[in-house]
Amino acid sequence: MQRINDNNPLGFHVPEPSARPEEQPDFSHIRLSDAGAIARPPVDCDPAITHETSCDLIRVLDDDGKANGPWDPKLSATHLREALALMCLTRAYDDRMFKLQRQGKMSFYVKALGEEAVAIAAARAMNSEDMMFPSYRQQGILFARNRDMVEMMCHCISNSKDNLKGRQLPIHYTWAEGNFFSISGNLGTQFPQAVGWAMAAQAKGETAIAASWVGDGTTAEGDFHAALTLANVYRAPVILNVVNNQWAISSFAGIASGAQPSFAARGIGYGIPGLRVDGNDYLALFAATKWAAERARSGLGATLIESVTYRGESHSTSDDPGRYRPKDEWKSWPLGDPILRLQQHLIALGEWGEKRQQELETAQAEQVRLAYKEATSFGTLREGPLAPTSTIFDDLFVEQPWHLRRQRQDLGV
């Protein structure tokens, strides 16, 4: 046995990413599994037995685009084509909105490049009455639930048709009619909110469940741990998603994880099953969400899902990723591009082709262009018209308190 020397000075440990700017990308630390290799446990299993599903990687699509194993959801070609179209639409929308921000026509934007499958698969695996508590890279949920693109754009440019009347940052969408909870800039708050909503639905005897998303960095926040505790204690019907896209705004995932390979495994310690899923595999994500949703609807409580993916673009338009990671590192990501992988799967099935893909992308780019043209007919960020000043007092209280009435009088509105 090695003798411990009490006189040795203590060392201070700070996890470091595998590569920095000007270095070669290195993803050898990413723990992968073969497609179809991970068993699918019963929905009513004891969380303690989900060690394999939370530490290895649930995958369905292999490198040839073929579906494998017990997690294959056996989706129809029509479903897959619709999913591909939604993912491509999200990317086309992101591309245009990002460029508009760079042109000064919008103040702020966040792209979901490389993460489109995370939102689209979850939204399509759940029911329309289920409540979504997203972070700011799940705009795909809105497209999957048929949110009007013009109204999304009107919010982003804060014009007279902005449903939030200029009181939220761009891309902090909210859509009550579509069960899409207002995005919070204070990251992490949506996790306990989702658990609380699910507990309320449970107490009222409703059938809807909730889902929420945070990034890997947010797992270091207290809200993450409070949410898992509440979800376990009350068996809340909620799906808690960690999008492990390898980077918080400028710190790599190892800072929040302590350089451990799995976020999903944390669920077991709270008495919650964990699923670690290939976040660029639409089929695997759909199947994992279906499994978790069935468990929640059966009264068996929450599931923690980790989607292993990669943030292909900057954290936001306020960020320069070239200062902390290799340029074009995303192109070396071992799990590929979620759109190309689903496209490859459809081609392997004989249900798609390069020409159809080009036609789809061209049509969607035109759809986005026309939507923006219509959105600007209601005003622009620079020229207005904007929401009236009086609206800053609206939608806050059923009965407005005296001090707000006084402030409104002082402004003459």
Image: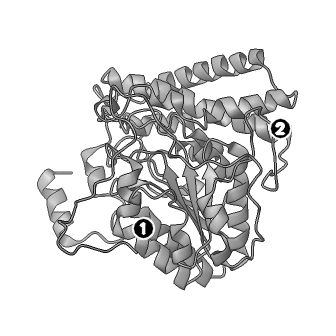
The quadrant where residue 238 appears:
bottom right
Quadrant into which the N terminus falls: bottom left
Q: Residue at x 39, y 52 (%)?
A: 254
105 relative to 296, above or below: above
Residue 389's spot in the image, x, y percent? 25, 46
- Residue 52 showing in the rendered view: yes
Q: Residue at x 43, y 32 (%)?
A: 313
338 relative to 252, above or below: above
Q: Which residue lies under the disc numbered 2? A: 78
Of the residues shown, which amino acid type is indicated by label 2?
Thr
User: Residue 258 bears which disc, if any?
Assistant: none
Give yes or no for contact between labels 2 and 1 (Cβ–Cβ under 8 Å): no
Question: Which sits in the foreground, 308 or 110?
Answer: 308
Q: Helix or strand or loop: what does disc 1 sit on?
A: helix
How crowded is the residue under tag 2: few (<14 C-alpha within 10 Å), some, or many (20+)?
few
Q: Is residue 168 left or right of residue 174?
A: left
